[in-house]
Every structure is written in structure tokens, then in C-alpha cells.
Amino acid sequence: RLLAQHKPDRPLHANVEFYAAVVMEECGIPPEMFTPTFALARTVGWTAHVLEQARDPKIIRPSARYVGRRLA
């Protein structure tokens, strides 16, 4: 509802950062630090993936079965 009020001409959907921002605001983190905080958290995760890949150099893909339409 808040997103629709903020941008009525654009269909926006909440993601995890939206809810994290609510928590960070309640913790007293200034809004200008929200983006650096998100970026830092993502960087830690990406670094963990790089280190994992370096230990076992194979492409890691989740198991999935495509059920969509076949293209010519």
C-alpha cells in the first residue's frame, strides 16, 4: 500500500530490502546509510561465493527442470 501511494503510476512490489529498511529505521540507522548497509551485506555474500568457488572450481547450478514453452 505504501509503495502504491509513493509511486501510483508504477506497479512496485516489496522485496527483502523494503522490510530490512523498516527494521534499520527502527534500529536508528540513518536512511542515508541504508544503501551502504545493503551493499556491504551483499558483498559479504558474494565474497563467500568466490571463496567457495576457489576451493572447488566448478559451476554450481541449482537443480531445476524447465517447464516453459520451447522456442524454435
Image (cartoon, rainbow, N blue to C red):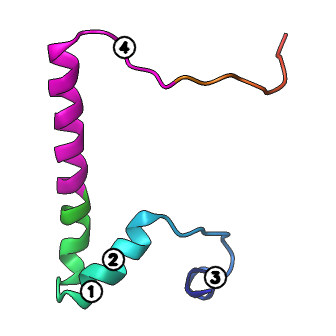
Q: Residue at x 69, y 76 (%)?
A: 9
Please identify, in this view, whether the residue under mark 2 or under mark 3 is nearer the observer. Answer: 2
Q: CA distance from mark 4 to mark 2?
A: 33 Å
Magenta segment boundaries in residue numbering = 39-62
CB atoms at circles 2 and 1 under 8 Å apart? Answer: yes
Q: Nearer the viewer, residue 31 or 55?
A: 55
Tell which circle, 4 or 3, labels the residue nearer the N-terminal end.
Answer: 3
Q: Secondary structure at mark 1?
A: helix
Q: Nearer the viewer, residue 39 or 60?
A: 60
Q: Amino acid at mark 4?
A: Ile
Magenta stretch: helix, strand or loop mostly: helix
Q: Nearer the viewer, residue 48 or 71?
A: 48
Q: CA distance from mark 4 to mark 3?
A: 40 Å
Mark 2 neighbour class, 10 Å CA radius: few under 14, some 14 to 19, many 20 or more: some
Q: Secondary structure at mark 3?
A: helix
Mark 3 neighbour class, 10 Å CA radius: few under 14, some 14 to 19, many 20 or more: few
CB atoms at circles 3 and 1 under 8 Å apart? Answer: no
Mark 1 neighbour class, 10 Å CA radius: few under 14, some 14 to 19, many 20 or more: few
Q: Which residue is mark 1?
A: 25
Tell which circle, 4 or 2, labels the residue nearer the N-terminal end.
Answer: 2
Q: Which residue is mark 3?
A: 4
Q: Which residue is mark 2?
A: 21
Residue 64 appears left or right of 55 = right
